[in-house]
Amino acid sequence: MSHSSAGATVGTATGATTGAGTVTAATPASATSAAGAATSAGGVIELVGVSRWYGNVVAVNDITMSIGPGVTGLLGPNGAGKSTILHMIAGFLEPSKGTLTIDGSPSTRNPDIYRKVGLVPERDSVYAFLTGEQFVRASAKLHKLPDIGAATASALQMTEMSQARHRKISTYSKGMRQRIKVAAALVHDPGILLLDEPFNGMDPRQRLHMTDLLAKLGAEGRVILFSTHILEDVEKLAATIQVMVAGRLAASGDFRAIRRLMTSRPHMFSIRSSDDRALAAALVGAPSTTAVEFTGKGLQVRTSDFGAFCQRIAPLARANGITLRELLPTDESLESVFGYLLSN
């Protein structure tokens, strides 16, 4: 079955190995034109029927996606296959099945792609005994850049690491280590930047600067692909998302349309009040309530409209002389959110 909601299309995936629902949302016209105007600066990453398994464990299952210039978020819970996809794009892992190309050339067993690709892995890949400047210079030397000093200084300035460049990496905070990894990945001015959970460990100011930097790089026509398990990171930065759940592609396209679809899905709430029985009777008549169940700890309420329910519950309780003691959503994890997308 298929239906449309908030500009996103929900349907049954056609891939023989997925057996999952897929959401596809159109990219805004403004984003499409901007990307098309700057295609030469970045490139195009194409995955067609890509799977990757380790023995009997399937990490990525029949993924098809195209990633062009601009900022794209790779969103999903931990263990969804995000890191595996980034490592395959970077050429560190070879697909077990399917094809993966960058500008038409395979990424594996192809050293030439490292001229145009920069990778920021989630795990620390730094030599802690080096200073920040020495680490970035080492990356510049590996790329055989003509002016190593200028490239190093530019990358350090871009990531706001110039003042800490003479400190050993062993003295850096988690957020500073993230930024020095980004500097090393940017030192050769790549057209494609891959980042695995880049905001981990950053304080609010560092997160804001990194968000601005990635947005600027994407606006220049580079391909920026970053993974995260936090919805807000994508909301602030990426207009386009690829949603991963259990190794499969659950949704793809315009973030705003997919976000509206996720918000309008059915929700479950756990409620405790001064009079659960009276509250249940009042909720049964509310238009957004689809089910009410008594539990040993209060009520379990299923609603068809998250926003409407949250707006009406307090006035409804007040009108009936009931005091709300606890109101908690019980299905707000990424697994449940995107499991809903897969089931439609």
Image (cartoon, rainbow, N blue to C red):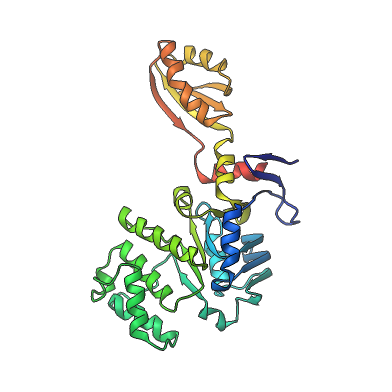
Q: Quadrant of the C terminus?
A: top right
Task: For residue 313, say whether it is visible.
Answer: yes
Task: For residue 297, say whether it is visible.
Answer: no
Q: Residue 44: image x %, image y %?
A: 61, 69
- Judge left or right: residue 76 versus residue 140: right
Residue depicted at x 47% and y 63%: 196
Residue depicted at x 34% and y 82%: 150
Number of marks in the rendered image: 0
- Judge left or right: residue 263 versus residue 316: right
Q: Residue 157 sits in which quadrant?
A: bottom left
- Judge left or right: residue 62 versus residue 303: right
Task: Judge by depth and name the residue closer to the eye, 299 or 199.
Answer: 199
Q: In the rendered image of this protein, does residue 33 appear above or below residue 166? A: above
Q: Residue 107: image x %, image y %?
A: 60, 76
Task: Judge by depth and name the residue closer to the eye, 39 or 280.
Answer: 39
Q: Residue 21: image x %, image y %?
A: 68, 47
Residue depicted at x 56% and y 27%: 303
Q: Residue 68 sits in which quadrant?
A: bottom right
Q: Quadrant of the N terminus?
A: top right
Q: In the rendered image of this protein, does residue 311 appear above or below residue 320? A: below
Q: Residue 111: image x %, image y %?
A: 55, 83
- Judge left or right: residue 148 versus residue 308: left
Q: In the rendered image of this protein, does residue 329 appear above or below residue 149? A: above
